[in-house]
Image: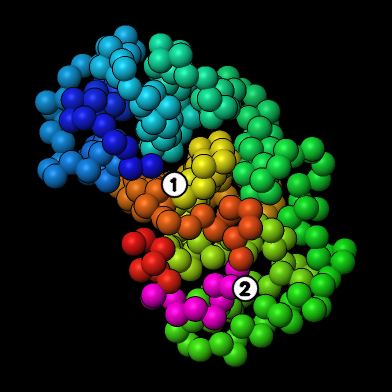
Amino acid sequence: MKIDASPARAQAILAAMKAIAGGELSQADRACIVAAGLYLFGSKEPPELAHLPEMTPQRLVDALRGSTLGNDACRCLTVMALVDGRLDTVKIERVVAFAEALHIHPDYVGELAQAASGDLQGALAHMVRDNMESVTGKPWAGGDMLAWMLPYRQQPDAPLAARFRALEALPQNSFGRAWIEHFNRNGYPVPGEADALNAVFSVPHDSTHVISGYDTSPRGEILTSTFTAGMHPNHPISGHVLPVIFSWHLGVEINAVAMSAQGQLDPEEIWRAWARGSQAKVDVFAPGWDFWAWAPRELDGLRREYYS
């Protein structure tokens, strides 16, 4: 999500982010706004926060008039509201006010407002739906998400597992070898083994870990999913960014697979991860992406091609 905006419009969005924080900015608030200026808008110098103009919803509407930046702005404001690790109803009400003024009504703003109003489980259910639709590329009919994520408990697939384990025979510098070593290093079962995650999810997700270089710590999981949001256009916020922020920064356990932690959002690196993902030439979550065609290829060369 590198945003192509004039300096004046970029400044207006950054000022709106500052308005979401309100009052005295925390260290995380400051880092978040500065990083957005540098990584999303490509500023050559860090924005001077004290010089950002006071921003209201109508002023943002006026500043963005004639552009298509409304949704980009709302995405920035949504993340900004959660940077301090709390469901702050006042901040979220400000996000809603900006979205309404811009006539933007995306799922992610609705889910944020729903969670802040007290219907956390309803908001999480919407995020799960959006995540499933984003990952599978088709409408999610509902049902037992945990059973979908762990299909091999009921029906292990030994030939599939053996095919993944055979990646250990590939050259040391290959993508496939890096992928299986990522699994071995973390003690993960591979798809097909009893406790493994569904290959439909784990193959592209863990490939994103390998390509991006982000680890599997809570911080790394936020950055990996944010990178995914920049790369994959299907429900990027509601299906990827919000769930990991709720899981790994707000401490909300969405399900037993996702687990949870608090305070793990890196307010600077999150925007860099987003910008990196938006520069990717290949979407590994896209239908038709072929993991097995990538597996024997040299990893460094693949990364160069991926970003060239």
Q: Position of residue 54 (x, y in %)?
A: 21, 16
Q: Secondary structure at mark 1?
A: helix
> Residue 292, which numbered label?
2
Q: Secondary structure at mark 2?
A: helix
Q: Could one spot residue 223 in this view of the protein? A: no
Q: Which residue type does callout 2 highlight?
A: Trp
Residue at 58% x, 73% y is: 293
Q: Position of residue 46 (x, y in %)?
A: 15, 41
- As displayed, is residue 126 above or below residue 302? above
Q: What is the CA distance from the residue labelled 1 to the residue labelled 2?
A: 23 Å
Q: Are marks 1 and 2 in contact (CB under 8 Å)?
A: no
Q: Is residue 127 magenta?
A: no
> Residue 230, which numbered label?
1
The answer to whether 143 appears left or right of 129 in the picture is right
- For the N terminus, the quadrant is top left
User: Around disc 1, counting alpha carbons within 10 Å, would you say few (fewer than 14), some (14 to 19), or many (20 or more)?
Assistant: many
Q: Could one spot residue 76 in this view of the protein? A: yes
Magenta range is 291-301
Residue at 47% x, 50% y is: 231
| Residue 213 placement: quadrant | bottom left
User: Around disc 2, counting alpha carbons within 10 Å, would you say few (fewer than 14), some (14 to 19), or many (20 or more)?
Assistant: few
